[in-house]
Image (spheres, rainbow, N blue to C red):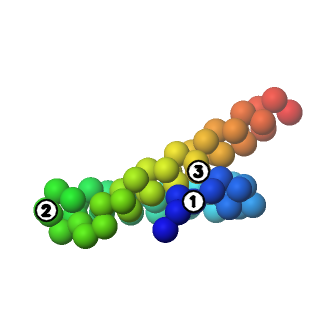
Amino acid sequence: MPLPKIDDWRELSDEEISEQILATKKELFELRLQKATRQLEKPHLVRHAKHKLAQLMLLESQRTAAAKEK
């Protein structure tokens, strides 16, 4: 499974990005919990979740910066 591309997220609205950020944070928490209890079978999913979260947060900050400039 390849890492998600940022172009996949650019089409989302601001509300959808915020929802995705919250969902990804919850997913990352669950993955970390599984890792701590040694129940995580696919450790690469942690990296994917972090990457996805970084992309979404970047988009959110870019959009807020663009909105402030207008």
Q: Residue furthest left?
A: 37
Residue underneath mark 2: 37
Residue annotated with mark 3: 56
In the picture, measured across the screen, residue 39 lies left or right of residue 67, that is: left
Q: Is residue 60 visible?
A: yes
Which residue corresponds to mark 1? Answer: 4
Q: How far from the left and from the top, in percent, is residue 51?
A: 49, 50
Disc 3 marks a residue whose amino acid type is Leu
Image location (x, y in percent) of residue 68: 76, 32
| Precedes in sequence: disc 3 or disc 1 | 1
Earlier in the chain: of badge 3 and badge 2, it is 2
- Closer to us: mark 3 or mark 1? 1
* Distance of label 3 from label 1 (alpha carbons): 11 Å
Q: Sort mark 1 into few (<14), some (14-19) or many (20+) by Cα contacts within 10 Å.
A: few
Left/right of residue 17 with respect to residue 7 in the rendered view: left
Out of 25 and 1, give the one closest to the viewer.
1
Residues at marks 3 and 1 touching, judged by CB atoms closer than 8 Å: no
Extreme residue in the right direction: 70
Identify the image quadrant of the C terminus. top right
